[in-house]
Structure formats: C-alpha cells, structure tokens
Amino acid sequence: MTEPAVAVDLHCHSTASDGTLSPASVVALAAEQGVTTLALTDHDTIDGVAEAVHAGADHG
C-alpha cells in the first residue's frame, strides 16, 4: 500500500526579509495549495514567525 503524498515547503521567504508576501499571506497561499508543513526561512530574522504561526492556526 502506498502512503498518501504530503505537500511540504521547507524554504520560503516573506516580507520579513526578501520575500514579496507577508508571513500570513505565505501561509494562506501554502494552505490554498495544499501544503501541510511549512518552514518560514527568512534571512537573518525571525520577525515573521509569530504572524506565520497565528496564520497557521487559522488555516488548521
């Protein structure tokens, strides 16, 4: 039996560094695309993590 595919993104940036989307928007877009595990990997900062965590809770 084959395990179901899981969508994971372990490298994405937000406006907390050089990305074009806010941390909440990164999470929302990932959720829309079926991503179940996401790592926010902004350069030299964790400033967007709290916003991303709250957005993740909103998206389940």
Image: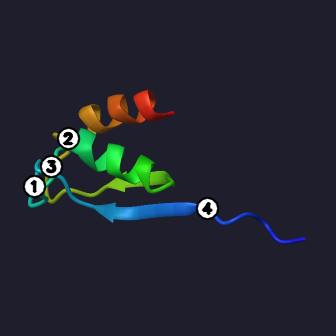
Separation of marks 3 and 4 at Cα, in angstroms: 28 Å
Amino acid residing under circle 1: Ser
Amino acid residing under circle 2: Gly
- The numbered mark, 2 or 1, whose residue comes first in the sequence reads 1
Residue 32 spot, x, y in % from top left: 42, 49
- The numbered mark, 3 or 1, whose residue comes first in the sequence reads 1
- The numbered mark, 3 or 4, whose residue comes first in the sequence reads 4
Between 2 and 10, the residue placed more toward the observer is 2
Residue 25: image quadrant is: top left
The reply to whether the C-beta atoms of the residues labelled 2 and 1 are less than 8 Å apart is yes
Separation of marks 3 and 2 at Cα, in angstroms: 8 Å
- The numbered mark, 2 or 4, whose residue comes first in the sequence reads 4
Q: How crowded is mark 3: few (under 14 residues within 10 Å), some or many (20 or more)?
A: few
Q: Quick one: quadrant of the N terminus? A: bottom right
Q: Which residue bears the numbered disc 3?
A: 45
Separation of marks 4 and 1 at Cα, in angstroms: 27 Å
Q: In this view, does 30 lie above or below 55?
A: below
Q: Which residue lies furthest to the bottom in this view?
A: 2
The reply to whether the C-beta atoms of the residues labelled 3 and 1 are less than 8 Å apart is yes
The reply to whether the C-beta atoms of the residues labelled 3 and 2 are less than 8 Å apart is yes
Q: Which residue is drawn at 78% across and 66% down?
A: 3
Between 32 and 47, the residue placed more toward the observer is 32
- The numbered mark, 4 or 1, whose residue comes first in the sequence reads 4
Q: How is the image coloured?
A: rainbow
